[in-house]
Image (tube, grey):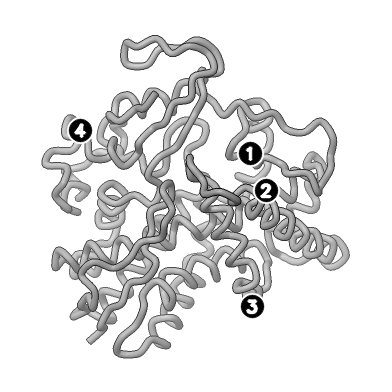
């Protein structure tokens, strides 16, 4: 079953009868694949998310703003007259932010880049032959990497999130490792796409100046028009109903976020890129029907939404101010093969 309208996707994401159906392992075996809380249902999801969410409050994240601005300025200053915005800006910015936040050595990001890309690719509903083995191997290597780091933090704790997580006694070792992998992968993969997709659409429509004037509505329109996460899936945990249609227990349902974000019943002229639709005065964020669904809804609403928005706004504004004459070198840049996470493989631009 596939849900495409804003109404149906919203209803499914909020309905507790639709979940993931994953049950955590009965034994705490760190080497056994452990489902992160992203794919768990209550009460396990509720417990794990509550423990991690303490580090993602708006107040805590606002403290990161000066550092994000500094990293952004450093990356822009290092770019030449022509650059690949993905490799030189959109990718390293959120990676450096999340690695510093977690306490992961930034020089290690080339080491775990392949693992992260493999796990992101594993979200797709249909994987190429042999991908399951590759994914399992990447997961094992990623968990081994974090096991070493966590052991160090237990002996020499710092002010980072990894050190804080080692002190949470309610987390088993397997849950701790799965959470670390999730935070690192989710903490940058989607934000890379947000920044790159934003630059591409602003440049195509001659609207880069809008990001310099006010990046907030620009980021919201990028999230609606070209969301980094295109779809998500759930399973009917018991008999349910969606849009007047009976859904038997056990039925998988695919929610097309990208389609829901272009529902003309909610967003007039939905195929037009128009940051103005989110300008203050025209948009009421308190009204659920007017919200885009790029970060989901309900209990699985993206934990890092505030951080992603902050990074996107800072990055796009700084780029617009530093390179107001930015031009695309390729009108049709290549995309990664991922289905769920929509992102550019590269974005060649001329900055001046």
| Neighbours of disc 3 within 10 Å: few (<14), some (14-19), many (20+) | few
Label 2 – label 3 distance at C-alpha: 21 Å
In the image, is residue 313 above or below residue 3? below
Q: Quadrant of residue 103?
A: bottom right
Residue 338 lies, in percent from the top left, at 43, 53
The mark nearer the N terminus, 1 or 4, is: 1
The mark nearer the N terminus, 2 or 4, is: 2
Residue at 74% across, 51% down: 177
Residue 185 lies, in percent from the top left, at 57, 56
In the image, is residue 82 above or below residue 202? below
Q: Which residue is mark 1?
A: 37
Q: Which residue is mark 3?
A: 107
Label 1 – label 4 distance at C-alpha: 31 Å
Badge 4 vs badge 3, beta-carbon distance below 8 Å: no
The mark nearer the N terminus, 2 or 1, is: 1
Front-most of residues 32 and 81: 32
User: In which quadrant is the N terminus drawn?
Assistant: top left
Badge 2 vs badge 1, beta-carbon distance below 8 Å: yes
In the image, is residue 121 above or below residue 265? below
Q: Which residue is mark 4?
A: 266
- The answer to whether residue 247 is left or right of residue 142 is left
Label 2 – label 4 distance at C-alpha: 35 Å
User: Helix, strand or loop at disc 1?
Assistant: helix
Residue 66 visible? The answer is no
| Neighbours of disc 2 within 10 Å: few (<14), some (14-19), many (20+) | many
Q: Which residue is mark 2?
A: 179
Residue 23 lies, in percent from the top left, at 69, 28
Label 2 – label 1 distance at C-alpha: 7 Å
């Amino acid at each position: 079953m596939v849900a495409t309208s804003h109404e149906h996707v919203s209803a499914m994401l909020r309905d507790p009868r639709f979940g993931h159906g994953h049950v955590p392992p009965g034994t705490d075996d760190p080497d056994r694949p452990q489902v992160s809380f992203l794919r768990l249902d209550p009460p396990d999801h509720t417990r794990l998310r509550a423990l991690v969410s303490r580090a993602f409050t708006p107040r805590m994240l606002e403290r990161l703003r000066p550092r994000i601005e500094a990293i952004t300025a450093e990356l822009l200053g290092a770019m030449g007259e022509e650059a690949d915005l993905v490799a030189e800006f959109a990718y390293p910015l959120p990676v450096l932010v999340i690695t510093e936040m977690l306490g992961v050595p930034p020089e290690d990001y080339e080491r775990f880049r392949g693992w992260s890309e493999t796990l992101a690719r594993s979200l797709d509903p249909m994987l190429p032959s042999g991908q399951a083995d590759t994914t399992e191997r990447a997961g094992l290597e990623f968990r081994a990497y974090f096991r070493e780091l966590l052991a160090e933090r237990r002996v020499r704790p710092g002010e980072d999130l990894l050190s804080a997580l080692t002190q949470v006694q309610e987390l088993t070792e397997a849950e701790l490792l799965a959470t670390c992998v999730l935070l690192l992968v989710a903490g940058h993969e989607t934000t890379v796409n947000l920044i790159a997709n934003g630059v591409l659409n602003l440049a195509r429509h001659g609207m880069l100046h809008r990001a310099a004037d006010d990046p907030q509505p620009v980021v919201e329109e990028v999230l609606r028009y070209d969301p980094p996460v295109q779809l998500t899936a759930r399973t009917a945990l018991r008999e349910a109903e969606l849009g007047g249609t009976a859904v038997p227990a056990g039925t998988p349902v695919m929610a097309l976020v990208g389609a829901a974000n272009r529902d003309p019943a909610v967003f007039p002229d939905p195929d037009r890129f128009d940051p103005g639709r989110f300008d203050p005065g025209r948009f009421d964020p308190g009204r659920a029907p007017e919200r885009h669904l790029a970060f989901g809804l309900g209990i699985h609403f993206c934990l890092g939404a505030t951080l992603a928005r902050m990074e996107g706004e800072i990055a796009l504004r700084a780029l617009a101010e530093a390179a107001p004459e930015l031009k695309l070198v390729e009108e049709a840049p290549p995309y990664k093969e991922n289905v769920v996470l929509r992102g550019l493989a590269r974005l060649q631009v001329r900055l001046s």
